[in-house]
Image: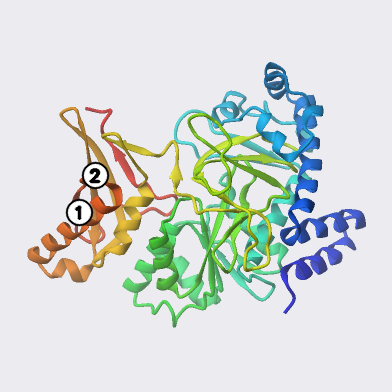
Amino acid sequence: MLNYVETISKELLIAASSSIQQEEVFVRIMYNKIEGASRETIEALQLSRLRETVERVYRLVPFYKKKFDETGIKPAHIKSVSDVSNLPFTTKKDLREHYPFGLFTTPMDQIVRIHSSSGTTGKPTVVGYTAHDMEVWTEVMARSLAMGGTGSGDIVHNAYGYGLFTGGLGFHYGAERLGAAVVPSSGGFTKRQLLLMKDFGATILCCTPSFAMHMAEAAKEEGYDLKADFRLKAGFFGAEPASKGLRMAIAEAWGINYHEAYGMSELIGPGVAASCIHGNLHVFEDHFLPEIIDPDTGTVLPDGEEGELVFTTITKQALPVIRYRTRDISMLHREPCQCGRTIVQIETIKGRSDDMLIVNGVNVFPSQVEHVLTKVEGLTPNYLIVLDKKGVLDKLEVWVEVDDRTFADGIGALETLKKKLETEMLNELYINVKTKLVEPKTIERSVGKAQRILDKRDKG
């Protein structure tokens, strides 16, 4: 079987006979081979592209020119990849303050696509794409899907949302680039999704982790045998954090290989990183330059230390971003992977620095709560974290559904389960957590990003 580099190279050479020029194809083949290149080769490519990007934003974006000038930084000062740490940060607030097109580096007659974030407060962040940006996005999505063995013989059931959200269209074009058949089902309509997955013989599932578990539950209720009635072999899940326990539960329920997909609209959409067959999350660092910083001080941290992910895009045209603070908590590793890739790895996102809950001085991430729930038998992965005040102290309560069998066992069994769960929570979070066991199907389901937190502390 051809490896991925050989496969994608052949596809690109075929494309060269139509709209893509030969020299562009040659360069893009080299980009794909970069996944297994030496660190010296990777950094040489990164430095060239970083210099071009910094020069571009300094020349074309007043916001960046002003920030660079204030810190005394000029494009000519970029002599090595590590010099990126001397550049100023960009935040979501910066993008919103320049709504809608204030940070674009290309005129609107070169923009072929516009997406925006699904922010819940304030103005959305707007992202533009040139034809070149769309090619880059399609390429990294194809590379992401190829990590899970997706190819021309596959049927990809794409249950990410289409529209302004980048998930649906990102996976769609990446799968088509590999020659796979795409079922653009989008979100919702769970029973119809299951029918299409079974009848069309879907082999690849793309959706959020919470919707994957929701569909697994619904399939069992409808009488499906998840492993006999479906032909799925792999799934690509992202857009929300998922603990190791939830990832294992999804893989086991569907009998598939679980692959993570990491990205965000401000950078390009999904396609910034994806996990290989060994479960390691690889960054496509020929397009995205990652750093880890201390979220409080902004200091760059060494590989292996946990902190906030920061990315600089080094091939984007319409909306390059310099040192974008993702607020995602992770760490970097550069040792070669068993899969043969040498591009940098990031740890699965533990949480977000701005989603972190501080409960009586203790930091708590929702993914930590989720991890405990997936270890305790008798519970479902459906939960809600409720924060309130008791006097001057914070009160944290976790509502979680029990499964049908446990609920039928009666009050005694539920009390035993509740005590066990609260003990596990104390061991994991180092704080006392009250739990509330609720009937199956009573916590509202989500067909998009799951809403896991209800914070009532500021409302009392």
Name the spot of residue 244 as percent of width and height, x first. Answer: 42, 60
Q: Residue at x 36, y 47 (%)?
A: 366
Please tell me the numbered disc located at residue 422: 1
User: How many angstroms separate mark 1 from mark 2 (CA)?
Assistant: 10 Å
Amino acid type, mark 1: Glu
The quadrant of the picture occupied by the N terminus is: bottom right
Q: Horizontally, is 204 left or right of 351 in the view?
A: right
Question: Quick one: label 1 or label 2, which is nearer the N terminus?
Answer: 1
Is residue 388 or residue 159 the one in the foreground?
388
Is residue 352 or residue 24 the one in the foreground?
352
The residue positioned farthest toward the left in the image shown:
412
Judged from the image, the secondary structure of the residue bearing numbered disc 2 is: loop
Above-or-below relation of 120 to 441: above
The quadrant of the picture occupied by the C terminus is: top left
Is residue 5 or residue 180 the one in the foreground?
5
- Residue 403: image quadrant is bottom left
Name the spot of residue 83 as percent of width and height, x first. Answer: 71, 34
Q: Which marked residue is nearer to the observer: mark 1 or mark 2?
A: 2
Above-or-below relation of 159 to 82: below
Q: Dot 1: few (<14), some (14–19), or many (≥20) neighbours within 10 Å?
A: some
The residue positioned farthest toward the top in the image shown:
70
- Residue 172: image quadrant is bottom right
Name the spot of residue 47 as percent of width and height, x first. Answer: 78, 41
Q: Residue at x 45, y 66 (%)?
A: 192
Name the spot of residue 263 as percent of width and height, x first. Answer: 58, 48
Please tell me the numbered disc located at residue 431: 2
Amino acid type, mark 2: Ile
